[in-house]
Amino acid sequence: MADSEIPLVVRDLHKSFKDVSVLNGLSLEAHEGDVITLIGASGSGKSTFLRCMNLLEVPDAGDIIVHGEPVAFKQHNKTREPASWKQVERIRSRLAMVFQGFNLWAHMSLIGNVIEAPIHVLGVPRRQARERGMALLERVGLADRADYFPAQLSGGQQQRGAIARALAVDPEVLLFDEPTSALDPELVGDVLAVMRELADEGRTMVVVTHEMDFARDVSSQVIYLHEGRIEEAGAPADVLKKPNSPRLQQFLAPRF
Amino acid sequence: MFDFQGYGPRLLEGAWLTAELAVLSLIAALVIGLMVASAKSSRSMTLKSVATVYTTLIRGVPDLVMMMLLFYGGQIGMNMATDGLNAWLGTDMFINVNAFAAGVVTLGVIYGAYMSETFRGAFLAVDAGQMEAARAYGMSPWLAFRRVRFPLMMRHALPGINNNWLVLLKSTALVSIIGLSDMVYVADQATKATHQPFLFMLPVGLGYLAITAVSELVVTGLKRRFDVGFSQAT
Ligand SMILES: Nc1ncnc2c1ncn2[C@@H]1O[C@H](COP(=O)(O)OP(=O)(O)OP(=O)(O)O)[C@@H](O)[C@H]1O
Ligand SMILES: [Mg+2]
């Protein structure tokens, strides 16, 4: 398939912080409707990999191609930089990210958070953005909380609101970095339920998670990272049920 | 009884000059402060060191000395520039440094240094995730500053800005040294002529208090504005 039809292609990413090499040649292809889950031990590079995809970290080498458009890079004082931050901003607005710590803008109401990027980044008229935003809040079960501020919402509500904010920009790909890790156990279910719905309706998603049930039931592909390399990847039925790598076997072994 | 022995109109003019000078200097100081704070948190070593030298210098030298240095130094600099141009163009220009403008620039430059420290602390007090989300949603640096960093930072900066403003307001009295007739200068002249210090200095004190009272109202309004989303926490 031509790259131009694939929402997100990442090829051979490398990234070091100072002299420590964190990503050592990572690639993935997120086709329309794919749900790719990234699993791996703490420090294996999952977040860094995800953050490279929308250039929150700039990879030292490798390609990022969004719907056929490669991110352009240039060398500047021996470090690699995007050639055009305008292009990066445009691409970021097409790859919405959901953070572990929610990161809803604290000084804006929930609906304000949801309509912020559509209005100010994408130029959607306010009325239209608001209508769409209210519909999205309805979807994630927060219509009655539209005028609340983040500090007045539970973690689970904030994260569902953050998902509505992500959907509001109509992204090609949704990027999730451990969306349920900061939540009390009883709040995890609501957030995962929303994510399952998104997967069912064919959203393209890349999800860093420790939720093995979610990875098994929802993903089309599971990638296991170890020290910045893909140690094993494939369908969840293979990777999670019949892991080849001893490291992955140990990673998946029930913890007591 | 309120004609202040004929000094009434001049006192009012002086009060107006004080208010004008204070407000314009405040605006200059805020702009300079924001720029210097941004320079200090930038990645460029040059910007960083220039900003650090500036704040260290300003904060280490008395305001009065700084003011004279900038005012007279400014005039000399201007003269050298025009002399150079005159020699080159064969003209005969002379630009007089306007005392009011010099006052605004000087107070702006001095209090800009203090404001920059206030802003820098306030920048650091904003959770990094807030700016990260702004970038992740495709905001340009300017949009992210305007919509996210600035409103979040102001909550932390307001008390410091208010302090600096009150000190700045009182420092406007120093401008009489460069030849401006602010209200303290007028009252001083009047006192020397009439030997009635209370008749003139009391209203001047009240004048400052009035400006301070108005500014407290403004600050209270701003506090409420920038506390949105925080004071409502459950
Ligand atoms: N900004 C940074 N500066 C220096 N080192 C970093 C930075 N970000 C990440 N690292 C390092 O890179 C490695 C990979 O980090 P990363 O956050 O990607 O891991 P992770 O797989 O997401 O882990 P976790 O499950 O704990 O979130 C770690 O060793 C981390 O210390
Ligand atoms: Mg992580």
Image (cartoon, coloured by chain):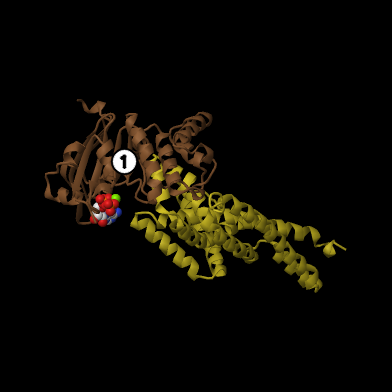
Question: Residue B145, percent across and down?
Answer: 46, 47
Chain designation of label 1: A
Question: Residue B45, percent across and down?
Answer: 34, 57
Q: Is residue B95 above or below residue A7?
A: below
Query: Which quadrant of the rendered structure holds the N terminus of chain B?
Result: bottom right
Q: Residues within 10 Å of mark 1 (few under 14, many from 20)?
A: many
Q: Is residue A183 above or below residue A53?
A: below
Q: Which chain is yellow in the picture?
A: B
Mark 1, secondary structure of its residue: loop
- Residue A237: name its quadrant: top left
The residue that label 1 is drawn on is A54
For residue B198, side relative to residue A232 (left or right):
right
- Residue drawn at point x = 32 percent, y = 47 percent: A178
- Residue drawn at point x = 24 percent, y = 34 percent: A220
For residue B230, side relative to residue A256 (left or right):
right
Q: Which chain is brown in the picture?
A: A
Q: Residue flagged by tag 1: what amino acid is it?
A: Asn
Question: Residue A222, percent across and down?
Answer: 22, 40
Q: Nearer the viewer, residue A212 or B8?
A: A212
Q: Is mark 1 within 8 Å of ligand 1?
A: no
Q: Nearer the viewer, residue A107 or B143?
A: A107
- Residue drawn at point x = 25 percent, y = 29 percent: A6
- Residue B192: name its quadrant: bottom right
